[in-house]
Image: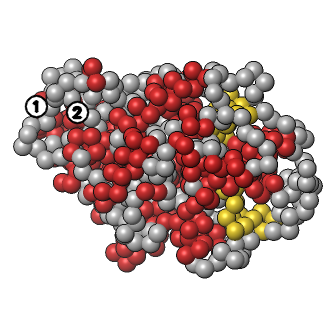
């Protein structure tokens, strides 16, 4: 057997054995986890579309144009250069090997050489990006802070080694007569010209040497990939296929059974140990590329908090690998091993792996999920750990306890009680119907006001403006008044799943009792909860946000903005209206319809809108670390030179108004709801 065949096959068998063992071990870690219901329902339909758009099309990566293009060419380069790997193995056995049928195609030769060059250029781009964003120099400002940068450089070296040896042995082939392609394989022929003076004999030896090196580097790279973060090359397509569609935002993934009749003494709520994460969540941990895109947009991280979504996922991945022996030992091999109870000696994930300040800094805004190119669902993992801390350990920020007690006892986070829920109507010059029995047939919408718009002085302006707009447009509506109670969103995002379900069941019963069919909500958190989360408990209702309804009323001519409002307005996207529910255009359409208004977009807007800092129950928690999130966002709004900051969420109104006042700019800049802005342009009744 020729030496080149022996070396090539030996390297291949050894590498496949090592990598195969590693991949099998990892697959067991995933397969023995608890089930993740509904994760296969998108296959093949939406999953195929996701593979085309997200994996093949690199949609999310291309949002960052330069690195996105570099990654696109590298990904497609390695995909199409699989042809050259087959050719390399064929060349081990026959120097004149070519693909049967199309092995001498000028098109194939051109494509292969084009991507050889494209990948080399992409590597230079990646190197420049990493030098520019050197985490040792930029520290937290770098999205690579905390990533395994050494492994990243080694990966670039491996890729360069594969491409350079490929190009050199092909170049040598052009001088020995073994190359199957003509001049369309331009790069190979150009480099071949540089090697031609060495003579046919030397080129023949170079062909053999670089061919063996190419195969050896490919196999070494395979082993390296199986032990590094670049494993995402193999697992990312699976993670994307099993992700929630159309997006992993809106509703939380899991709605645990909190029925007390089904709860046993050893029942565990949330995630306290790695055993309790589902197989999809464990797949998330393995898939992380450590690119830091999530970290760079996280409102907690960018304002000096310890929470980095990337570092959370990396920490959980490290914990999973460190706990592998225990996990696999407790598994019975049927995919249900994750249900085994962790031993009493095993410390919980918080605080051993995830620091409490990390866990409680999250606003659940979803920026991390939106930005992740491989569809990791950070928010669900964080909330699952919060559930364990709240329900199993009673470890949480003390001020959060008051919020939970207020919801439980008074039906709102402030503890003001149901009797005050109609006080906002007293400032109106018309009567707002309050449902006493069932909703009358002539009432088109049930207006779900929400706690903030009912009870907070600034939030009430939103409810009053919305009510006046509906009245002016001739839209009949009614409210629940004292029957309305907190939807439970703050409790759920805080981790008290039991309280959320109790609130949800009570509200669903109330809505069904009064015969609610069409609901308009002003608060994006209420809107999201009733629309996306109540269905899991049997609450199916038609729900729209008041921004959508106002846009409809303007478009259909039922509200006609006539009076000029000569103001510069910047619109702040509420996270739970925009990113979680994709309502971006409707609020802007309303503002565009107002004569005289000049809209100015903030740098971070729409899908990349920056959080006000109130979500994830952070509205009721002290912000003691770093810069206040609402002040960071307000600085960006003020930098636009706008006279008005408009939004469509009472939480956002309160948070941004607080920050404007803290900066002493309340006399120059006002924070208003979309309904208030529209009202300024309508002629007097």
Q: Is residue 521 visible?
A: yes
Q: Residue at x 16, y 29 (%)?
A: 266
Q: How many marks?
A: 2
- Residue 281, horizontal then vertical, whole percent: 34, 38
> On the picture, is 562 further left or further right than 598?
right
Q: Secondary structure at mark 2?
A: loop
Separation of disc 1 and disc 2 at Cα? Answer: 20 Å
Vertical placement of residue 637 versus 455, above or below: below
Circle on res. 125: none
Q: Which residue is mark 2?
A: 268
Which residue appears at 79% of the width and 44% of the height?
430
- Would you call the spot at circle 1 few (<14 residues within 10 Å), some (14-19), or many (20 or more)? few
Location of residue 274 (image quadrant): top left
- Give x and y (percent) for residue 217: 30, 51
Asked which secondary structure carries label 1, the reply is helix
Q: Nearer the viewer, residue 574 or 161?
A: 574
Which of the 4 image quadrants contains residue 343?
top left
Q: What residue did someone put label 1 on?
A: 329
Task: Give the left or right position of residue 49, taking residue 677 as reference.
Answer: left
Q: Residues within 10 Å of mark 2 (few under 14, many from 20)?
A: some
Reading the chain from its start, which is encountered first: label 1 or label 2? 2
């Amino acid at each position: 057997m020729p030496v080149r065949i022996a070396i090539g096959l030996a390297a291949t068998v050894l590498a496949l054995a090592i990598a195969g063992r590693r991949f099998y071990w990892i697959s067991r870690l995933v397969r023995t986890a608890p089930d993740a219901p509904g994760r296969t329902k998108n296959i093949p339909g939406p999953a195929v579309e996701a593979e085309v758009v997200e994996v093949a099309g690199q949609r999310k990566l291309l949002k960052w144009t330069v690195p996105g293009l570099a990654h696109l060419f590298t990904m497609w380069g390695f995909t199409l250069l699989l042809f050259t790997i087959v050719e390399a193995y064929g060349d081990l056995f026959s120097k004149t090997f070519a693909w049967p049928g199309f092995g001498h195609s000028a098109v194939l030769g051109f494509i292969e050489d084009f991507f050889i060059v494209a990948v080399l250029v992409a590597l230079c781009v990646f190197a420049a990006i990493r030098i520019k964003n050197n985490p040792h120099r930029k520290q937290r400002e770098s999205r690579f802070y905390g990533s395994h940068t050494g492994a990243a450089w080694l990966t670039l070296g491996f890729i360069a080694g594969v491409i350079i040896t490929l190009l050199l042995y092909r170049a040598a082939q052009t001088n020995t007569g073994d190359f199957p392609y003509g001049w369309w394989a331009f790069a190979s022929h150009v480099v071949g010209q540089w090697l031609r003076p060495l003579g046919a004999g030397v080129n023949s030896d170079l062909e053999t040497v670089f061919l063996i090196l190419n195969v050896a580097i490919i196999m070494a790279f395979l082993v390296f990939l199986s032990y590094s973060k670049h494993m995402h090359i193999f697992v990312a397509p699976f993670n994307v296929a099993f992700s929630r569609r159309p997006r992993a935002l809106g509703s939380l993934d899991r709605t645990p059974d909190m029925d007390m009749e089904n709860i046993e003494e050893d029942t565990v709520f949330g995630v306290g140990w790695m055993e309790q994460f589902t197989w999809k969540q464990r797949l998330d941990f393995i898939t992380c590329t450590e690119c830091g895109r999530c970290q760079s947009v996280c409102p907690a991280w960018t304002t000096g908090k310890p929470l980095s979504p990337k570092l959370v996922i990396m920490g959980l991945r490290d914990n999973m690998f460190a706990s592998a022996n225990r996990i696999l030992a407790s598994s019975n091999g049927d995919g249900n091993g994750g249900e085994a109870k962790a031993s009493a000696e095993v410390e919980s994930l918080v605080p051993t792996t995830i620091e409490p300040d990390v866990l409680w800094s999250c606003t659940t805004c979803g920026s991390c999920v939106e930005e992740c190119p491989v569809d990791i669902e950070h928010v669900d993992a964080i909330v699952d750990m919060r559930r364990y801390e709240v329900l199993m350990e009673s470890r949480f920020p003390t001020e959060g306890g008051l919020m939970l007690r207020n919801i439980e006892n008074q039906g709102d986070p402030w503890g003001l009680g149901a009797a005050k829920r109609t006080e906002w109507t007293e400032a109106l010059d018309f009567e707002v119907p309050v449902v006493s029995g069932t909703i009358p047939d002539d009432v088109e919408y049930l207006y779900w006001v929400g706690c903030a718009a009912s009870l907070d002085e600034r939030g009430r302006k939103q409810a009053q403006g919305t009510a006046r707009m509906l009245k002016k447009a001739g839209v009949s509506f009614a409210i629940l008044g004292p029957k309305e109670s907190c939807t439970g969103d703050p409790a759920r995002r805080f981790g008290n799943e039991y309280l959320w379900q109790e609130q949800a069941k009570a509200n669903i019963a109330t809505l069904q009792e009064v015969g609610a069919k069409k609901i308009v909500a002003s608060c994006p958190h209420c809107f999201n909860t009733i629309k996306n989360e109540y269905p899991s408990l049997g609450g199916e209702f038609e729900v729209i946000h008041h921004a959508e309804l106002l846009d409809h009323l303007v478009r259909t001519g039922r509200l006609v903005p006539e009076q000029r409002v000569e103001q510069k307005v910047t619109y702040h996207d509420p996270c739970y209206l925009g990113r979680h529910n994709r309502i971006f255009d409707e609020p802007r359409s309303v503002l565009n319809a107002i004569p005289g208004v000049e809209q100015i977009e903030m740098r971070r807007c729409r899908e990349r809108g920056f959080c006000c800092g109130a979500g994830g129950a952070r509205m009721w928690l002290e912000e003691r670390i770093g810069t206040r999130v609402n002040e960071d966002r307000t600085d960006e709004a003020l930098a636009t030179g706008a006279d008005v900051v408009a939004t469509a969420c009472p939480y956002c109104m309160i948070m941004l108004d607080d920050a404007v006042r803290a900066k002493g700019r309340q006399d120059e800049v006002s924070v208003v709801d979309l309904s208030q802005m529209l009202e300024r342009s309508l002629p007097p009744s």
